[in-house]
Image: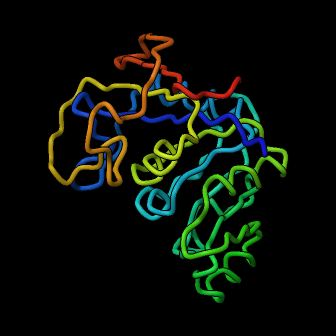
Amino acid sequence: MPRPYVILNAAMTLDGKIATSCGDSKISSEADLTRLHRLRAKMDAVMVGAGTILADNPSLTVRRVKGRNPIRVVVDGMARISTNAKILDHSARTIVAVSRAADKEKVERLRQTGAEIIISDGENIDLQWLLEELYRRGIRKLLLEGGSTLNWNMISQGLVDEIQVTVAPRIVGGAAAKTLVGGDGFCKVKNGVRLRLSKISRVGSDVLLVYRTAGAQRD
């Protein structure tokens, strides 16, 4: 079954952090934020994990450039996000993916906000199945905006085709600060996901790196 073409986008510091140990994730320059909104406007949907909604409460809309808002997809296995989250406003269509293990009352409250609910069998969301379901709903290009746990799960399962990362000229340190990709990780460098550099450019004060994964689908 086909799935959408997936682009992972993130901004990180030179030491690979996407947020500080205190949770500050304001890393992108103004120029890079404009680039991100331009990219969103080209996508059918943008996807994040529940942790990103709980930490940052983003709206995931297009505001800095002219263009349509993408469909917003939240991977929220246990239906943890608040019904007051910005992503549940009516500025764009929103899909919340939950698991069978999620509290039914919480799921119903999310449904009552107008969000579309997708329920995955099992205690965890099957991401391959979710992408196939999104494809069935007309989503062909999907922008993945993390966070680090969802990034890991998507990359480690071979579900990311392209990675766009802007590197900010900052070093923030912190053993507890979130990195671009979290999760269990690979024990051997040789087992890591292989990438092919396709573009390097400057975006304001940042450097943009664009990679294709070894098993990338055609755009």
Q: Quadrant of residue 103 in the image? A: bottom right
Q: Which residue, as the protein is rendered here, is positioned at the far bottom? A: 105
What is the count of numbered marks?
0
Report the coloring of the rendering.
Answer: rainbow
- Residue at the image point whose x is 73% and y is 69% from the top: 117
**Residue 162, percent across and down?**
55, 28
Vertical arrangement, residue 4 with respect to residue 206, above or below: below
Vertical arrangement, residue 97 with respect to residue 172, above or below: below
Task: Identify which residue, 130 or 138, lies in the foreground.
Answer: 130
Q: Is residue 116 left or right of residue 50?
A: right
- Residue at the image point whose x is 41% and y is 11% from the top: 202
Q: Is residue 199 left or right of residue 219?
A: left
Q: Is residue 170 left or right of residue 45?
A: left
**Residue 55, percent across and down?**
40, 60
**Residue 118, percent across and down?**
73, 67
Quadrant location of the C terminus?
top right
**Residue 178, percent across and down?**
29, 49
Q: Is residue 111 left or right of residue 12?
A: right
Task: Identify which residue, 205 or 186, lies in the foreground.
Answer: 186
- Residue at the image point whose x is 70% and y is 23% from the top: 218
- Residue at the image point whose x is 58% and y is 81% from the top: 102
Vertical arrangement, residue 67 with respect to residue 154, above or below: above
Vertical arrangement, residue 136 with respect to residue 100, above or below: above
Task: Identify which residue, 204 or 212, lies in the foreground.
Answer: 212
